[in-house]
């Protein structure tokens, strides 16, 4: 099995999934966050593609959690009424699972890597997927209870996330 091709397919699938979710939501803030996630997955695809050709050396950390927090803050200030359907929450739960599997895949590949540069990149990709998983878990919480989520100080736990390599 070509791990690079497999990883690229996973990233492409995730990108398309987030773009589809962005098209489905009627909420501009959530659409922006989902579009950011799709763009992140496209970056991961390019990084894995570069690893395959031997031209990759680093993956930069992304500020997606900070941007997501800003979007949630804007939604809180807007006092918009949110009404979500169960199917929307289920779609976000599926995204949580996709991110968890991607994170686990990259951790496994990092442990198998013989090239130290590739190991670092796989660990960085795992870290990025962990951030996406955290963000999607927050999406599930938000669509499950939007009024209390935006009022509850717990959504500030993005600050508690310490991005570190696995």
Image (tube, rainbow, N blue to C red):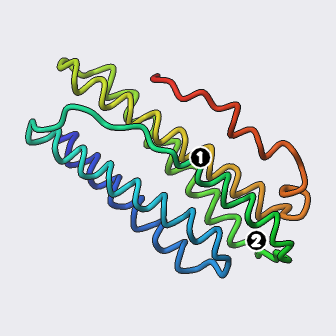
Q: Give 100 or 57, whichever is nearer the viewer.
A: 57
Is label 2 or label 1 in front? 1
Q: Nearer the N terminus, badge 2 or badge 1?
A: 1
Question: Residue 96 vs residue 119: left or right?
Answer: right
The picture quadrant where one finds residue 161 is: top right
Residue at 47% x, 42% y is: 129
Question: Residue 70 vs residue 164: left or right?
Answer: right
Mark 1 falls on what kind of element?
helix
Residue at 53% x, 49% y is: 64
- Percent coordinates x, y for residue 132 in the rendering: 54, 47
- Percent coordinates x, y for residue 59 in the rendering: 31, 37
The picture quadrant where one finds residue 13 is: bottom left
Distance between mark 2 and mark 1 Cα atoms: 25 Å
On screen, residue 17 above or below 67: below
On screen, residue 28 above or below 165: below
- Percent coordinates x, y for residue 62 in the rendering: 45, 43
Residue neighbourhood size for the residue with mark 1, other residues' Cα within 10 Å, grouped as few (<14), some (14–19), many (≥20): some
On screen, residue 81 above or below 55: below
For label 2, the residue is: 86
Residue at 53% x, 42% y is: 100
- Percent coordinates x, y for residue 152 in the rendering: 89, 49
The picture quadrant where one finds residue 51 is: top left
For label 1, the residue is: 65
* Label disc, if present, on residue 138 of the rendered structure: none
């Amino acid at each position: 099995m070509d791990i690079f091709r497999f990883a690229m397919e996973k990233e492409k699938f995730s990108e398309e999934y987030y773009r589809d979710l962005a098209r489905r939501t009627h909420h501009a803030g959530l659409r922006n966050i989902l579009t950011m996630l799709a763009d992140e997955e496209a970056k991961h695809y390019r990084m894995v593609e570069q690893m395959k050709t031997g031209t990759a050396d680093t993956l930069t950390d992304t500020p997606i959690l900070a941007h997501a927090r800003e979007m949630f803050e804007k939604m809180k200030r807007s006092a918009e009424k949110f009404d979500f359907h169960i199917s929307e929450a289920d779609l976000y739960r599926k995204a949580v699972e996709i991110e968890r599997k991607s994170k686990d895949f990259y951790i496994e590949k990092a442990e198998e890597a013989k090239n130290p540069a590739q190991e670092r990149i796989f660990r960085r990709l795992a870290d990025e997927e962990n951030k996406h998983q955290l963000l999607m878990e927050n999406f599930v919480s938000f669509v499950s209870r939007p009024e209390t989520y935006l009022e509850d100080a717990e959504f500030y736990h993005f600050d508690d996330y310490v991005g570190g390599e696995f």
